[in-house]
Image: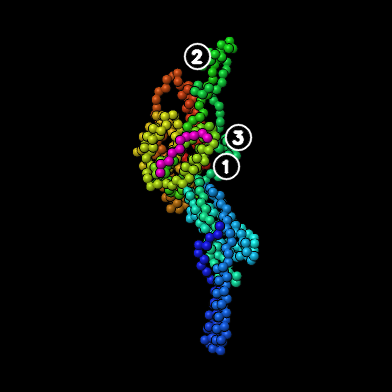
Amino acid sequence: MTRRLFAPLVPTARLLWLAGALAAGAVAVAVAPVLASGWVIAAAALGAVAAADALAGLQRRAPAALRRVPGSLPLGVRHEVVLRFANDMAHALTLEIYDHHPPGMEARGLPQRLVVPGRGWSELRYAVKPVARGVARFGAIEARIASPFGLWACTRCLGDAATVRVYPNFAALTGFALLATDNRLSQIGVLQRRRRGEGLEFHQLREYREGDVQRQIDWKATARTAKLVSREYQDERDQQVLLVIDCGRRMAARDGELAHFDHVLNAALLLAYVSLRQGDAVGIMTLSGERRFLAPRKSRATVNAILNRVFDLAPSLETPDFHAAAVEIMKRFRKRTLVVFLSNLRDEDDDTLAPALRLLQSRHLVMFASLREEILSRALATRVDTLERALTHAAAADYLRARERSFPRDGRRRRCVPRRRARGAADRARESLSRREAVRKALSGAKITTSG
């Protein structure tokens, strides 16, 4: 669709050079008046030609324009945008193209000059790199069409506006999907092991062994086979995982090209994908800022549902209240759940974080994942050869020690376990530790440190 929103005429460099030459001729006429008649004729001819060329330029039909861009783009990844121009006139058109891309995208390759042949089409390509999530809008394509003699350029707005969605960087999930297809999830730390024990999920029937408790005996199978048959159980595999995403003011800080909040979203997507591959149900919940909640689910579309729920989230100016979040989780979830907090811990969080973790640990398995800034690692790795670098190194080390002390490692509740339940409790503890280790390995590539 072609739209003529405005059509101002802009003089080209060719017309400006001719006007400059005419001005130089005026100086010559001042020195030699005998040249005045010739200068007047040249000026009249240039004015007539420029006027006729301007009229012809305004009457030229603009080409049809089409923009090809995906409806969804990953954050921080360059993508190609294709602009196609079709000319239905017999003569060629010379265009200078500038596409009005969203302000939240960096463009490379604009503006461009393009010649569209008569009764033909041409394409140009340029790259965009989204630097902000959310809904982004492409405006009209601005084209300057040269007049027949090239003295003027007529500005037209072509094509239609387009809206795209910028999601957290899900490009990494493609690689993990290939690993899952080849059953090579162990490369990212996910080890699938079947453990037999005194869990609650039925696994199989087998012959009675010495040491089996009486409640394991299947009396119907024993009557059919005329020998003792025991039921074997395994630990429950379909657990619930809740990802609690901090949307507080500290998450707006940038580390490299991305904000802390974007690193958290990338880690959440990866953790959700790994958990779904293990057969767990995954949900999300936001902490501070705009409240969003997605109940845990196990369908294949869960990752897409999470993407659509969080793609336009932005950090707020609020301070995270971990205790309020813990109270809400306790109200929503009666079943034991793995609760993973994704945040950026500071020592001022002690007042609300420690009571929140104690409350949640009374029913749920809790993990706290805190961002690790690259700038601190670079400061510690830099060679200390000046006083300024020594001060920077000492400050970074002191800051990291303070953050380490802020992790509430002693917040776990200790309680006695009856001897008859000791074996089952130990199995569940080992299962919890193995799950924590898998989560830690999955988060290690996303600049995350964890505390249980």
Q: Is residue 295 within the magenta segment? A: yes
Disc 1 and disc 3 in contact, CB within 8 angstroms: no
Residue 214 marker? 2
Give the crowd class for mark 3: few <14, some 14-19, many >=20 residues within 10 Å: few
The percent coordinates of residue 437 (x first, y second) are 50, 34
Residue 183 marker? 3
The percent coordinates of residue 353 (x first, y second) are 38, 37
Give the crowd class for mark 2: few <14, some 14-19, many >=20 residues within 10 Å: few
Q: Is residue 409 left or right of residue 193?
A: left
Q: Secondary structure at mark 1?
A: helix
Reading the image, the residue beneath label 1 is 174
Q: Earlier in the sequence, mark 1 or mark 3?
A: 1
Q: Secondary structure at mark 2?
A: helix
Nearer to us in this view, 62 or 291: 62
Q: Is residue 250 shown above or below 191?
A: below
Q: Is residue 340 within the magenta segment? A: no
Nearer to us in this view, 217 or 404: 217
Q: Magenta stretch: give its range.
A: 290-299
Q: Nearer the viewer, mark 1 or mark 3?
A: 1
The percent coordinates of residue 174 (x first, y second) are 57, 42
